[in-house]
Image: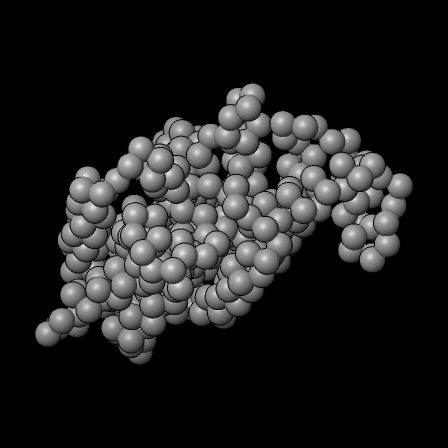
Amino acid sequence: MKKEMQSRFAILIFLLLIFLVLTFVITISVGTLDIPLADTVKVILGKMGGYELNVDNPFSNIIWQLRVPRVLMALFVGAGLAICGVVMQAVVQNPLAEPFLLGISSGGYLGAVFYIMLGAFIPVFYTELGIVFFAFVGALLASFSVIFLSSYKSKLSTTKLILSGMIINAAFQAVANFIVAISGSYESISRIAFWTMGSLNASKWESCLLPACTVIIISAYFYSQYRNLNILLQGDETAVTLGVNVNLFRKLYISIISLMVGLLVSYCGIIGFVGLVIPHIGRALVGANHKRLIPIAFLLGAIFLMIADCVARSLLENMELPIGVFTALVGAPFFAYIMIKKNYSFSN
């Protein structure tokens, strides 16, 4: 039975890897300007091999300078949010937990608002990456405020963590909305609104490296922690009985999640539902064992966000939908379908 499960898991991984590659190539080819798949493959292979193939220059520039970085960013952001959702649900022991539970989104929102509204008065920070810096700082400030509040004068518990996240989320969002209300112009408000709904439009080669390295390293780390995550999912009493320092690992894992989600939010804005839906789809496929769930969630998250971004930028002519809106529109009914049709236990 165990060998049969392992072989099924290996087949599933293999199929998802093939689908990932196909999705990567197809989503690069599809857009407001459709490019033949053969030309896309030629350009990618030619650039990777360090030589130019016989492809029209306009296609080459569009593929390599615009679409490849954007699709790569979608791949790693989707994978990263999915991994954070898996870990967060294990740490909090709640199937409704997701990466933005700790107020990270409101912290990033406040940082972005501060930059957009007041960044012009701070010339040293008024650069292309200024909004990334301020959103990242805001996200980290919010998440570490939650950790401090939930563990102040007592051990960190899941209930206090969730309540602290709600408090910090409300407080940061109120401050951000106050800044918008007193100093916002139509142009700045439009920019803020688009950022809060998520976008990969600003993705470039130089902006892909840090998110990619961060997601790969942290995902590998959490994969090495699958035993602790399995134990945490069973509850605090079981974890303590098995010798796991619940308080220590909970703080450590939440801090790491905060770093990764804060970084992703700072580059792409708030993209919801990926970290909530993908872990449940993964559990429906392979169960709750994190040794199998983490790689499956990584691949599913990457595939899902690449497809979502492709549809969001090509569904309407001469208009790009915010990707966060599209993931919510697709994710909500699909999540409901999974919960109704798939009978599985959250922790088994």
Residue 130 in percent (x, y) is at 42, 57
Residue 166 appears left or right of 289: left
* Left or right for 4, reference 35: left
Residue 206 showing in the rendered view: yes
Question: Foreground: 95 or 253?
Answer: 253
Q: Residue furthest right?
A: 54
Q: Position of residue 224 (x, y in %)?
A: 49, 70
Q: Is residue 229 visible?
A: no
256 vs 318: above or below? below
Residue at 45% x, 57% y is: 127
Which of the 4 image quadrants contains residue 138?
bottom left
Please name the residue shown 47% across and 30% down the image: 321
Q: Position of residue 77 (x, y in %)?
A: 50, 51
In the image, 97: left or right of 57? Answer: left
Residue 200 locus on image (x, y percent): 51, 43
Front-lying residue, 108 or 98? 108
- For residue 187, above or below residue 114: above
Residue at 52%, 46% (x, y): give it. 202
Rendered view: 121 above or below 317: below
